[in-house]
Image: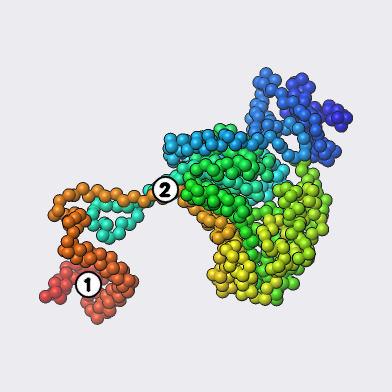
């Protein structure tokens, strides 16, 4: 309190200058919200004030108080106001507690879920989500949602995961905008009804054709994880809305700040039609209640244990389901790899990739014995260069009031941080880091351990900034390790990473180890390419999405045959052959006709030879008849026709 009072006059003069409102009595109109919260914010940023627990009162701003300025309340847990005059825009925060967290998110009552699902089915029955213009409007709404709330979304990521603005932009926000634009650009082509061939003898009933049309499935339930709360909420939503579905979102309850912000933005009506997008907040009880009700398609991203529960619930209603479940992703480094490049990329992908909390994160490294020492040395150098100990051993205080550990990031909760550190036990040996963990602040330091198949860290997905290094004798040894301990049990990895300059080794590994995705001489980036399908195989998931693949998953492709032959006369061969009475003559005719496709297939096999033989024969003939060449060069059509008639005789 004393610090705030002593700074009162200085902060008032600064605010008057910033707002260009020297004639406004700040003490009368908004001392509580503007002055006190601004002073608290600046003191918090400077480190002089770590917490402010006093409650602020949000005043009602009127045009009479600020005639040239527009004050609007934006939905960031009810504590952010935007002040705008022309192109100038300032933000002010009313603060309940400067601990960097918010608690305004409310759980959805269980008894309201059944009416919500029924309302979603009724909305879809109106067909309001199916027109092209409506779908484009929703996709533009998602794009605008991200662009207009960029800073707020980035701050929410910082509060939940301890990640800086570069991570938020590269891994979360920019990908959503680019995918929304990609879907807008291609939606009309995706929605087109396409003609497909009609095989013989069906095409005898001419005129007749076949077509394939994508139709929305209906109500889509999207269950979202906490590790990429913005991207894994909005990207499936883009695909489902592009396909014309009504969506019910179940965000994760673990990332409270991001979930609260997205709930307000998605359901506020400014960006998306709230009839087409509904949000259910809460934990396992709400998810379980949702799964009791019939929906038309389910998308779930998360762990395998819950994934099996989702699959069982979907099976009761025969609902198609997309499961993205992660797994232990192997990274194979061979003696033919560029070792410094491999070490740099693996270190970046493991640590910068949300501190290892990505389903496509490198989980363990299988390195050939002949290059193991060189690789580990280069890996340690890369970690020291990218994440110096000084950047996370002494955390800094950011503007949001959160402690930041350089570019490493935090675990989602203390429990998850404790789980990761517990994996580092006597069954493995620490060879790098592992000494500056701060579990009570959700921080696990970058760590490298040497492990084997019996180590506890190799028995489950690590999902943290810890790398396990396993030595293998050769490439075949790496293949045998993965297949023996994981693939033979159906535990196929979601992603596999190969570091080798040998095309032969690359093909050998890819043909021997099943995986949902693969990247060669890099990590993570295959999952950012929306021209590639994203999805697992076996225990790592089923079905795929992203871009056109996501549109296809959330659509049902209905095949249609259209016949415009209305003949009923028995003299029409198709009528005579199709309808009873059947006799031996019709059977003989049908057998003869059925052989035509086989004859055509045989003709197609010799067509490539015919295409070569005809020009060759023509060239040989002209070589033996130079007069013919002269006629052709002279373009003397009369001579050519006369010569042909004489030859015919």
Q: Which mark is residue 631?
A: 1
Which quadrant of the view contains residue 528? bottom right
In the displayed structure, 321 sits above or below 201; it is above
In the displayed structure, 224 sits above or below 542; it is above
Residue 483 lies, in percent from the top left, at 60, 69
Q: Is mark 1 on a helix, strand or loop?
A: helix
Q: Which colour scheme is used?
A: rainbow
Asked whether disc 2 touches disc 1, contact meaning CB atoms under 8 Å apart, the reply is no
Which residue sits at x=35%, y=55%? 196
Camera-side residue of 539 and 581: 581
Which residue sits at x=84%, y=27%? 9
Crowding near the residue tagged with mark 2, few <14, some 14–19, many ≥20 C-alpha atoms within 10 Å: many
Quarter holding the N terminus? Answer: top right
Left/right placement of residue 234 relative to residue 41 reads: left
Residue 499 lies, in percent from the top left, at 63, 68
Which label lies toward us, 2 or 1?
2
Task: Identify the residue under disc 2.
Answer: 214
Crowding near the residue tagged with mark 1, few <14, some 14–19, many ≥20 C-alpha atoms within 10 Å: some
- Given the current orientation, which residue lies at the most extreme top position? 64
> CA separation, marks 2 and 1?
57 Å
- Given the current orientation, which residue lies at the most extreme front position? 316
In the displayed structure, 89 sits above or below 300; it is above
Q: What element carries label 2?
A: strand
In the displayed structure, 424 sits above or below 397; it is below
Which residue sits at x=63%, y=44%? 284
Camera-side residue of 421 and 143: 421
Residue 250 seen in this snapshot? no
Which residue sits at x=17%, y=61%? 583
- Given the current orientation, which residue lies at the most extreme left position? 649
Camera-side residue of 285 and 50: 285
Which quadrant of the view contains residue 617? bottom left
Residue 511 lies, in percent from the top left, at 54, 70
């Amino acid at each position: 309190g004393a610090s705030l009072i002593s700074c009162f006059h200085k902060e008032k003069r600064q605010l008057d200058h910033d707002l260009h409102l020297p004639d406004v009595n700040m003490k009368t109109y908004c001392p509580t919200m503007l002055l006190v919260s601004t002073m608290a914010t600046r003191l918090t940023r400077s480190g002089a004030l770590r917490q402010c627990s006093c409650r602020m009162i949000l005043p009602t701003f009127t045009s009479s108080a600020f005639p040239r300025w527009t004050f609007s309340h934006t939905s960031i847990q009810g504590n952010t106001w935007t002040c705008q005059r022309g192109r100038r825009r300032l933000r002010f925060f009313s603060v309940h507690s400067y601990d960097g967290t918010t608690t305004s998110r409310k759980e959805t009552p269980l008894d309201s879920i059944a009416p919500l699902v029924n309302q979603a089915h009724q909305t879809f029955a109106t067909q309001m989500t199916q027109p092209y213009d409506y779908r484009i409007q929703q996709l533009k709404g998602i794009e605008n949602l991200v662009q207009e709330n960029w800073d707020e979304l980035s701050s929410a990521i910082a509060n939940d995961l301890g990640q800086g603005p570069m991570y938020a932009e590269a891994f979360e926000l920019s990908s959503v905008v680019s995918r929304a634009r990609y879907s807008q650009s291609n939606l009309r082509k995706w929605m087109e009804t396409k003609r497909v061939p009609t095989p013989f003898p069906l095409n005898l009933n001419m005129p007749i054709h076949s077509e394939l049309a994508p139709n929305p499935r209906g109500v889509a339930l999207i269950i979202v994880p906490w590790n990429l709360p913005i991207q894994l909420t909005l990207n499936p939503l883009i695909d489902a809305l592009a396909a014309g579905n009504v969506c019910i979102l179940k965000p994760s309850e673990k990332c409270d700040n991001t979930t609260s912000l997205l709930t307000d933005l998605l359901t506020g009506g400014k960006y998306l039609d709230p009839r087409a997008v509904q949000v259910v907040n809460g934990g396992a009880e709400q998810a379980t209640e949702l799964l009791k009700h019939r929906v038309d398609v389910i998308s779930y991203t998360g762990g395998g244990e819950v994934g099996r529960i989702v699959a069982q619930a979907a099976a009761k209603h025969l609902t198609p389901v997309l499961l993205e479940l992660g797994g232990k992703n192997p990274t194979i480094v061979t003696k033919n790899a560029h070792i410094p490049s491999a070490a740099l990329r693996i270190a970046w992908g493991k640590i910068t990739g949300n501190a290892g909390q990505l389903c496509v994160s490198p989980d363990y490294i299988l390195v050939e014995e002949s290059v193991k020492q060189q690789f580990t040395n280069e890996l340690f150098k890369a970690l020291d260069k990218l994440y110096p100990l000084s950047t996370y051993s002494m955390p800094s205080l950011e503007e949001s009031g959160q402690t930041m550990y350089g570019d490493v990031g935090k675990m989602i909760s203390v429990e998850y941080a404790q789980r990761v550190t517990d994996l580092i036990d006597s069954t493995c040996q620490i060879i790098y880091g592992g000494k500056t963990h701060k579990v009570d602040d959700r921080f696990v330091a970058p760590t490298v351990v040497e492990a084997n198949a019996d180590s506890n860290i190799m028995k489950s997905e690590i999902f943290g900034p810890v790398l396990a290094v396993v030595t293998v004798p050769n490439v075949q040894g790496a293949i045998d390790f993965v297949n023996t301990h994981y693939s033979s049990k159906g535990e196929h990895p979601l992603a596999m990473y190969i570091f080798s300059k040998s095309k032969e080794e690359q093909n050998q590994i890819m043909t021997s180890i099943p995986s949902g995705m693969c990247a060669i001489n890099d990590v993570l980036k295959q999952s950012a390419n929306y021209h590639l399908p994203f999805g697992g195989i076996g225990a790592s998931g089923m079905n795929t999405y992203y871009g056109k693949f996501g549109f296809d998953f959330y659509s049902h492709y209905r095949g249609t045959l259209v016949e415009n032959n209305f003949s009923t006369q028995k003299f029409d061969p198709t009528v005579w052959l199709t309808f009873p009475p059947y006799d031996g003559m019709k059977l003989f005719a049908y057998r003869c006709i059925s052989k035509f496709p086989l004859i055509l297939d045989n003709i197609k096999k010799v067509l490539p030879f015919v295409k070569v033989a005809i020009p060759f024969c023509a060239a040989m003939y002209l070589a033996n008849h130079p007069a013919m060449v002269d006629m052709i060069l002279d373009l003397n059509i009369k001579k050519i026709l006369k010569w042909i008639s004489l030859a015919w005789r």
